[in-house]
Image (spheres, rainbow, N blue to C red):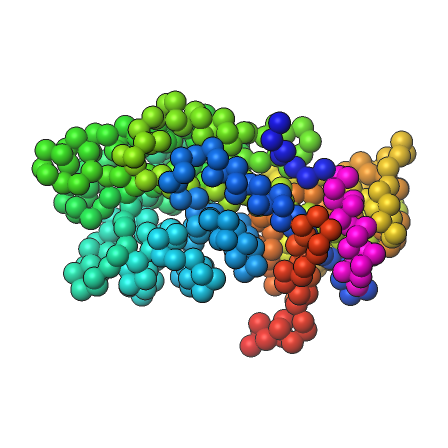
Amino acid sequence: MYPSNLTIESIGKAFRLALANGFIREEDTLVMFHDLSFLQERIHHLNSVFPASTLHAVAMKANPLIRILEFIHQLGAGAEVASLAELKIALKTGYTAEKIIYDSPVKTWLDLEFALTAGVHINIDSLAELERVATLKQTIDSGSTIGIRINPQVGVGTILESSVAGEYSKFGIPIKTGRKELVDAFLIYPWITGVHLHVGSQGCSKELLLSGIGILYDFVNEINEKRKTTGLQPISIFDIGGGLPVSYKGDQIPVSMEDYARAIAVKYPSLFTSHFSLLTEFGRWVHVNAGWTVSRVEYVKRDSGINTAMIHAGADLFLRECLNPKSWQHEYSVFDKTGNLKSGKDMNPYNLAGPLCFSGDILARNVALPMIEEGDYLVIHDTGGYTLSMWSRYNSRQTPRIIGYTGEVFEILKERESFKELEGFWG
Ligand SMILES: Cc1ncc(COP(=O)(O)O)c(C=O)c1O
């Protein structure tokens, strides 16, 4: 069975080694870890279940750490970027233009000019953006391939805030109401050779993701018939986006990437043939389960009814968890100061409270955990994606030290932010 999460045994082992080898210093009240072997296996798995020619452009927004970008790039991954800065980071990190997909709903003239000159694949988000690209292409001799993001309008998943294929979405051109304009665009501009969809991130079932692909698959077949009669090159780039959910809690059954790929091949067979260049943009599935975070417990407040463990991460690192706790929950483990896992029959409810100055800065409420004492360490599982990339500067806390490891070999991927760097942020 393909591993969905890191085991507590492997986390405990790495944690004890990090402690014993001085990787967690007194000032490292919060440290993030990435298991690079697990991450490597994720990229290998993607390559093994999709056709070999598929470009897996991993969503940079999930984890933009340069060392991680370099690591997955060496394994053959591409990058899906969502801003000009992400695009520049990808290029600087060594990703070639053919390995980069540029998505953003608010690309400026300057952004588009840069992307067209660099020659990356661009997914156009709106008809207005299409007009800009058409204008720019008159003067820029660009190697970019161009797709259009289409909202398949198949419905929302269980998390509204990360669903983007409802009847209304701020992303893409809606297939129902925008159909005529879409058909016209594909017949007017021969250089549009791709389609793109993204149904949502987490909270979307495999079936919902598949039906989104199905809507575009039928549409592309229809357009290609029309393009054939007018002598236009067929649409051949099919970008299925990301969105496969992962398991954060023990009771969440993970969706298998292998099953997802197989279902695409069965339902939409030509996507797995040489008629199409297939693109994917998984972020969460690649990164989340490869990482974990450890915070020192600075204090424990014991009130009647509920105890509160005061830790060093809250809404700065776990924005979604604090603001939308019903949808975003993790598993937690407690270690003592020498690195022994605490367990026991005597579980008590704890609130896990962050360090920020607002009352909603609570990572989780009423979590049943073994007795927590000052100086213990709380491990937050499955934090390899959508954590540091969503970091908030509120209260000016320094970003944590970030460590990568392969077996027993550790490396610092990013040092804890210095006071000088932090001060520099404020101008
Ligand atoms: C356009 C696009 N592609 C890919 C992704 C990655 O989604 P996930 O990390 O759920 O795979 C996102 C996430 O928001 C996205 O907006």
Name the residue at 57% across, 59% down. Answer: 67
Q: Quadrant of the C terminus?
A: bottom right
Q: Can residue 313 be seen in this view?
A: no
> On the image, which quarter does residue 316 sit in?
bottom right
Q: Is 26 left or right of 50, judged from the image as shown?
A: right
Name the residue at 49% across, 53% down. Answer: 73
Where is 424 relative to 153, above or below?
below
Q: Is 377 left or right of 357, judged from the image as shown?
A: right
Q: Position of residue 319 (x, y in %)?
A: 61, 50
> On the image, which quarter does residue 111 sit in?
bottom left
Name the residue at 54% across, 29% down. Answer: 256
Q: Is 156 left or right of 333, judged from the image as shown?
A: left
Q: Is residue 50 visible?
A: yes
Residue 20 forms part of the magenta stretch: yes
Which span of residues is magenta-colored? Answer: 8-25
Q: Position of residue 265 (x, y in %)?
A: 39, 26
| Residue at the outermost top position | 266
Name the residue at 32% across, 52% down. Answer: 122
Where is 395 relative to 247, above or below?
below
* Nearer-the-camera pick, 50 or 226: 50
Where is 112 relative to 57, above or below?
below
Q: Where is residue 274 in the image (x, y as percent from the top left)?
A: 29, 35
Where is 404 relative to 169, above or below?
below
Q: In which quarter of the image is the N terminus?
A: top right
Q: Position of residue 163 (x, y in %)?
A: 46, 38
